Image (spheres, rainbow, N blue to C red):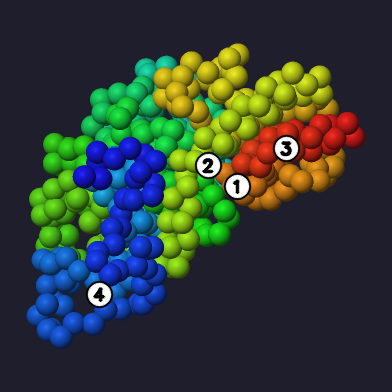
């Protein structure tokens, strides 16, 4: 029934359905553990022979209901919530990679993810090769090795606002017998469902548009159920051979299309944690209920703001795929026909001090280390989120040193424009 519902209905209804006399709103099951009268029943839960709850680090009814809603929105077979978007990206890859393995990733990704992949995971013995998403298929294919286990990209890059050619990346991944993992945070499944274009696994920072109110930090990993792990069993022993730490269970043989998410929970969550609190999942669900309405307003407002910036003599450049002369406009028409998101990247004529002065002159728009919020927010990545990167590294990550990331909110667009205008008059 849920699969037949349209996105707006799924935002409100999916994941939890109240029974007779039960609360209409998803309850917060704020408990670490769950009681059973029968010891054998508890043993079957630990052996994954029976479904149920016994410890919130592994499963919790509130968390699972929200995960089910996100899976329904993306069109996936299952999802797992994590404590942050960073944790989601790490788990999505670590679920199929181990020391000695390698993956290929677009270099135009969020700065925190860039550091996670290029520095932290390297310390765990997992290497990656960064490639330009605009490189030819042959150039990207050349980055693959015999031990490559995945290809990664962002639907819309943070903060550069480039649009990924998902079908091209899916084709390259599948030629090499590996899954395509897509971070779909910015468009959300309301505006793009990467599984429909060949992606296999989707991740989200639910902190962003899905929450929309800056109330919780969270993430999600969603599996399409489409990748045939057994066909490439030699590449993915963790999924396709017995797990001695779990009674010799072989995940994809025991759980079929749910093998990937089951392993993520039974093995990674068991050992590493990184779960969201049920209270956070409750707050996330409140945000999801209005996601389809907010995304439409974000996109409408951002289009107006992007057009104003595009025509301003004080603005050097603007990247927003809704603009007809944007280099990613054609890809956006294909993958994001209903709108992209509310985030605009632009640069002012001048230097880094010019950007800082403009930001400091804003009155309503908030300078925050956040994006994709109901409130309009602004950030200068080179001075803030990406300040650990050199100018050369910034450019490699698709971030110009003068780039300003403007996250257009859902306020009245005329008030947003008024604030931008008065700040521009002061530079």
**Mark 4 neighbour density, 10 Å: few (under 14) some (14–19) many (20 or more):** some
Q: Which residue corresponds to mark 4?
A: 54
Q: Which residue corresponds to mark 2?
A: 294
Q: Secondary structure at mark 4?
A: loop
Image quarter where the C terminus lies is: top right
Q: Secondary structure at mark 1?
A: loop
Q: Which residue corresponds to mark 1?
A: 374
Q: Name the one closer to the observer, 176 or 365.
A: 365
Among the two numbered marks 4 and 1 on one chain, the one whose residue lies closer to the N terminus: 4
In the visual, does 93 lie left or right of 346?
left
Among the two numbered marks 2 and 4 on one chain, the one whose residue lies closer to the N terminus: 4
Q: Marks 1 and 2: CB-CB under 8 Å?
A: yes
Q: Secondary structure at mark 3?
A: helix
**Mark 3 neighbour density, 10 Å: few (under 14) some (14–19) many (20 or more):** many
Image quarter where the N terminus lies is: top left
Among the two numbered marks 3 and 1 on one chain, the one whose residue lies closer to the N terminus: 1
Q: Marks 4 and 1: CB-CB under 8 Å?
A: no
Q: Name the one closer to the observer, 108 or 69.
A: 69
Among the two numbered marks 4 and 3 on one chain, the one whose residue lies closer to the N terminus: 4
């Amino acid at each position: 029934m849920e699969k037949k519902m349209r996105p707006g209905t799924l935002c409100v209804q999916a994941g939890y359905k109240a029974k007779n006399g039960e609360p209409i709103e998803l309850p917060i099951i704020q408990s670490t553990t769950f009681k059973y009268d029968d010891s054998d029943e508890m043993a079957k839960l630990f052996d994954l022979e029976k479904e149920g709850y016994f410890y919130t680090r592994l499963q919790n009814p509130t968390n699972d209901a929200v995960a089910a809603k996100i899976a329904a929105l993306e069109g996936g077979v299952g999802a797992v919530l994590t404590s942050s978007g960073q944790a989601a990206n790490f788990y999505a890859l670590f679920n199929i990679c181990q020391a000695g393995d390698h993956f290929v990733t677009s270099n135009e990704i969020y700065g925190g993810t860039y550091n996670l992949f290029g520095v932290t995971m390297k310390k765990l013995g997992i290497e990656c090769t960064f490639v330009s998403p605009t490189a030819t298929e042959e150039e990207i294919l050349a980055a693959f090795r015999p031990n490559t286990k995945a290809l990664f990209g962002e639907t819309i890059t943070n903060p550069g606002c480039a649009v990924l050619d998902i079908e091209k990346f899916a084709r390259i991944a599948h030629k090499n017998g590996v899954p395509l993992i897509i971070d779909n945070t910015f468009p959300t499944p309301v505006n793009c469902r990467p599984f429909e274009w060949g992606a296999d696994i989707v991740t989200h920072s639910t902190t962003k548009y899905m929450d929309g109110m800056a109330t919780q930090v969270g993430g999600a990993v969603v599996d399409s159920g489409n990748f045939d792990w057994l066909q490439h069993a030699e590449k993915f022993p963790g999924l396709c051979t017995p797990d001695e730490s779990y009674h010799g269970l072989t995940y994809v043989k025991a759980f079929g299309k749910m093998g990937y998410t089951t392993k993520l929970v039974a093995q990674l969550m068991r050992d590493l944690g990184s779960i969201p609190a049920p209270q956070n999942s409750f707050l996330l669900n409140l945000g999801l209920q209005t996601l389809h309405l907010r995304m439409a307003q974000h996109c409408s407002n951002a289009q107006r703001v992007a057009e104003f910036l595009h025509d301003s003599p004080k603005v050097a450049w603007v990247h927003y795929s809704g603009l007809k002369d944007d280099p990613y406009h054609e890809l956006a028409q294909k993958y994001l026909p209903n709108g992209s998101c509310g985030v605009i990247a632009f640069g002012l004529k001048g230097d880094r001090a010019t950007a800082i002065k403009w930001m400091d002159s804003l009155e309503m728009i908030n300078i925050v280390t956040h994006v994709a919020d109901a409130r309009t927010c602004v950030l200068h990545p080179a001075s803030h989120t990406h300040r650990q990167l050199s100018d050369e590294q910034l450019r490699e990550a698709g971030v110009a040193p003068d780039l300003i990331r403007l996250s257009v909110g859902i306020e009245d667009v005329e008030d947003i424009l008024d604030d931008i205008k008065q700040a521009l008059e002061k530079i």
